[in-house]
Amino acid sequence: TGRQFAAKNADAIFTHSNSLEETKAFYADVKSRAADEGRDPSSVRIFPGISPIVADTEEEAEKKYREFAELIPIENAVTYLARFFDDYD
């Protein structure tokens, strides 16, 4: 798998996840695989991609997020989600 290849060979991994829990699980998995490959887990750097939305208040940030989400055509959103369901439509 890509994770196994990265754990064995990579110095740095750029990744994206949809939640903090998913990010933590990815981190733990890759570090564990690196150790299993005989590597020092700290030698594998993991850089999670983030897309922060900054505003003065949480309500304003939520509003900005909703405005941003409305810019994405529904067809694109469905295509993106289909990846998680074996492209079932």
Image (tube, rainbow, N blue to C red):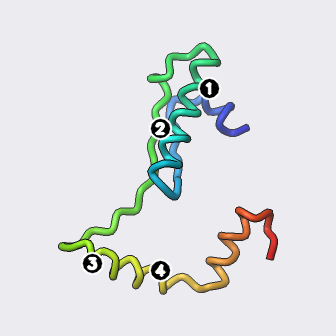
The disc, 1 or 3, on the residue closer to the chain's N-terminal end is: 1
Residue farthest to the top?
Answer: 38
Nearer to us of marks 1 and 2 is 1
The disc, 4 or 3, on the residue closer to the chain's N-terminal end is: 3
- According to the image, label 2 marks what residue? 46
The disc, 1 or 2, on the residue closer to the chain's N-terminal end is: 1
Residue at (59% x, 85% y) in the render: 73
Q: In the rendered structure, which amino acid carries the disc numbered 4?
A: Ala
Answer above or below: position of 84 versus 15. below
- Mark 4 and mark 3 residues within 8 Å of each other at the beta carbon: no
The disc, 4 or 2, on the residue closer to the chain's N-terminal end is: 2
- According to the image, label 3 marks what residue? 59
Q: Label 1, label 4: how many angstroms apart (C-alpha)?
A: 36 Å
Query: Dot 2, crowdedness within 10 Å: few (<14), some or many (≥20)?
Result: some
Identify the image quadrant of residue 66.
bottom left
Q: Residue 74: x percent and y percent?
A: 62, 85
Nearer to us of marks 4 and 2 is 4
Q: Label 4, label 3: how many angstroms apart (C-alpha)?
A: 15 Å
Nearer to us of marks 3 and 2 is 3
Q: Which mark is residue 22?
A: none
Which secondary structure lies at badge 2? strand
- Mark 1 and mark 3 residues within 8 Å of each other at the beta carbon: no
Q: Label 3, label 2: how many angstroms apart (C-alpha)?
A: 31 Å
Q: In the rendered structure, which amino acid carries the disc numbered 3?
A: Glu
- According to the image, label 1 marks what residue? 33
Residue farthest to the left?
Answer: 56
Q: Residue 72: x percent and y percent?
A: 54, 82
Q: Residue 69: x percent and y percent?
A: 47, 80
Residue at (51% x, 45% y) in the render: 14
- Mark 1 and mark 2 residues within 8 Å of each other at the beta carbon: no
